[in-house]
Image (spheres, coloured by chain):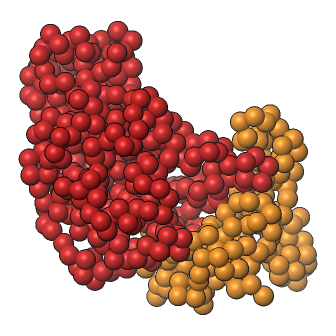
Chain colours: A red, B orange
């Protein structure tokens, strides 16, 4: 038994400066139109929270329900940083699978501030996220850069490889009307953009964006009666890391020690995808494409290995061969990825599933992956939140 | 904290540490302060003082330990633009350089600022660095990775 995506909707990503609720409602209405349902048909709404306005619980599920018009529908809200969308999907899916409802709406939206993400204000000496800024000035790109530098040292990646990821994703994004950045770029343009956190340049790093995304999920029985398209949610992985973590993770000061307890079989990112494969009963070779969380260009290469598209140290080879491009053997980020969208945190994992849905319906237009039958969306939320979804037809 | 800094004596006020209990400076030598679980032997930095985080360990005695002062660079980067508050950036701004350094005995990686004068061009993955400390722009001391002596 599984859950089906009946509808998907997005508000275009950008830097619109409007209240996030507007993006969420626009996406929700679009998803309902796409599903051929009315808001009154929704029995359960799950909101993925933004932290922008404080009151995380207040500004998600119930805020969207009120803006859509109170109907008495049941509601839930959740926050798991970048993985908030996946958790919202999982909550909706679980309630459907439990037989407690047939139709659920999942909504995430954000209005992002300018510049670097920074911690919540005040003197918070017990908060590692506050302390890493206070003591080290360690921004999010600093962590992405540490991974990128390590790829260069261990696997011979070059800044031109990183730039090639941006070129590839910008081309896909130019074909996506929901993307914020619609222009194509060249390797030279990426390499000429200002250095932010060596070796990563401005165009290697994803921006912060406004955006909203929504999904209408339903039970298989309801979908059959409704006659809607049958994109199936085959797996949702929301796993946490396994002790001891041996990769320095944002926002930590150190890894766990692996001196007394041996490291786990898989790193966290690999474990996030592995759990999804296990649940779906498929492997990486069964995928038609993957949406991975390219917070930086270099991180897309890490993800390609973590989700098993190639072995460790082989992602550059995959990239250079064009395998991960549109039209390649296993397109990665056919939506254009974060490189073309920028990150609208609580909406992003939901937006990934919107892309899975469009691709699996064969409705992705100029960026359509031919014969798409299975797609993976993977992401990692701050403080140890895994996020992976596999959808199939 | 005052106990740890008593070596500074009566003549000079001990420098303020940017975070208490994570490192100490004695006779000009900087040490990272971790803890080690008395039951399973796992070392923690920053210190875990109440409960061991090994899921198979119920240890609640985690005495303080000093970590190795030398390690090898796991990775490194810099901040070409001034980091946002609560970081206090120096004016004029000099890029903050960061190194994640692997301590072999403890089998863990610790992130820290690199001492002024060492730029990313001077660093390599695998090179040895040694712990020291230096002031943040507004005064308090923080641990830093510097050239191995």
Please state the horizontal and vertical placement of residue A308, each as a whole percent of the image: 44, 49
Residue depicted at x 89% and y 64%: B3
Please state the horizontal and vertical placement of residue A217, each as a whole percent of the image: 25, 24
Q: On the rendered image, what quadrant is the N terminus of chain A found in?
A: top left
Based on the displayed image, in which of its 4 quarters is residue A125 positioned? bottom right
Q: Is residue A325 toward the left or the right of residue A278 in the image?
A: left
For the residue pair A377 and B13, the one nearer the viewer reads as A377
B78 lies above or below A217: below
Please state the horizontal and vertical placement of residue B92, each as a whole percent of the image: 46, 88
Based on the displayed image, in which of its 4 quarters is residue A251 positioned? bottom right
Q: Is residue A172 visible?
A: yes
Q: Is residue A105 visible?
A: no
Q: On the rendered image, what quadrant is the C terminus of chain A found in?
A: top left
Q: Please give the count of numbered marks on the rendered protein.
A: 0
A27 lies above or below A98: below
Residue depicted at x 29% and y 33%: A391
Residue depicted at x 19% and y 24%: A230
Q: Is residue B134 toward the left or the right of residue A314 in the image?
A: right
Residue depicted at x 33% and y 19%: A2
For the residue pair A336 and B29, the one nearer the viewer reads as A336
Please state the horizontal and vertical placement of residue A56, each as a whole percent of the image: 39, 37
């Amino acid at each position: 038994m599984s859950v089906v995506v009946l509808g998907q909707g997005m508000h275009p990503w950008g830097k619109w400066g409007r209240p996030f609720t507007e993006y969420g409602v626009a996406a929700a209405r679009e998803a309902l139109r796409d599903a051929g349902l009315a808001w009154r048909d929704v029995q359960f709404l799950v909101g993925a929270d933004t932290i922008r306005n404080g009151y995380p619980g207040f500004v998600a599920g119930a805020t969207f329900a009120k803006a859509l018009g109170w109907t008495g529908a049941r509601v839930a809200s959740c926050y798991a940083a970048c993985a908030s969308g996946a958790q919202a999907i999982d909550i909706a899916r679980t309630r459907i699978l439990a037989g407690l409802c047939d139709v659920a709406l999942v909504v995430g939206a954000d209005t992002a501030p300018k510049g670097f993400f920074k911690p919540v204000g005040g003197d918070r000496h017990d908060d590692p996220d506050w302390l890493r800024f206070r003591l080290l000035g360690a921004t999010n790109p600093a962590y992405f850069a540490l991974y990128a530098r390590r790829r260069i040292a261990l696997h011979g990646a070059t800044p031109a490889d990183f730039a090639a990821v941006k070129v590839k994703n910008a081309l896909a994004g130019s074909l996506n009307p929901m993307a914020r950045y619609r222009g194509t770029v060249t390797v030279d343009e990426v390499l000429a953009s200002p250095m932010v956190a060596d070796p990563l340049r401005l165009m290697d790093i994803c921006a912060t964006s406004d955006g909203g995304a929504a999904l209408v999920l339903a039970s298989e029985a309801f979908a059959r009666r409704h006659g809607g398209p049958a994109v199936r949610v085959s797996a949702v992985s929301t796993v946490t890391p396994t002790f001891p973590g041996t990769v320095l993770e944002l926002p930590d000061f150190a890894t766990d020690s692996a001196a007394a307890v041996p490291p786990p079989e898989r790193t966290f990112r690999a474990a996030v995808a592995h759990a999804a494969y296990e649940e779906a009963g498929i492997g990486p070779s069964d995928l038609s494409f993957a949406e991975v969380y390219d917070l930086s260009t270099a991180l897309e290469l890490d993800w390609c290995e973590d989700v098993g598209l190639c072995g460790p140290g082989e992602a550059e080879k995959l990239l250079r061969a064009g395998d991960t491009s549109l039209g390649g053997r296993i397109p990665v980020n056919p939506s254009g990825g974060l490189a073309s969208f920028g990150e609208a945190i609580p909406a992003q994992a939901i937006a990934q599933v919107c892309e899975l849905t469009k691709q699996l319906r064969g409705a992705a237009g100029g960026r359509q992956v031919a014969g798409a039958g299975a797609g993976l969306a993977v992401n990692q939320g701050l403080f140890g939140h895994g996020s992976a979804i596999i959808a199939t037809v | 904290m005052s106990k740890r800094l008593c070596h500074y004596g009566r003549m000079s006020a001990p420098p303020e540490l940017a975070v208490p209990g994570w490192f100490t400076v004695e006779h000009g030598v900087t040490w990272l302060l971790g803890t080690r679980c008395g039951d399973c032997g796992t070392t923690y930095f920053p210190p875990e003082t109440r409960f061991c985080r090994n899921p198979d360990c119920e240890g609640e005695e985690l005495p303080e330990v000093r970590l190795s002062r030398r390690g090898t660079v796991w990775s490194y980067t810099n901040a070409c633009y001034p980091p946002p508050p609560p970081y206090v950036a120096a004016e004029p701004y000099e890029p903050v350089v960061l190194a994640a350094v692997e301590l072999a005995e403890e089998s863990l990686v610790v992130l820290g600022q690199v001492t002024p004068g060492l730029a990313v061009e001077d660093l390599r993955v695998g090179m040895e660095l040694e712990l020291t400390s230096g002031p943040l722009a507004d005064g308090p001391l923080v641990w830093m990775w510097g050239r191995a002596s």
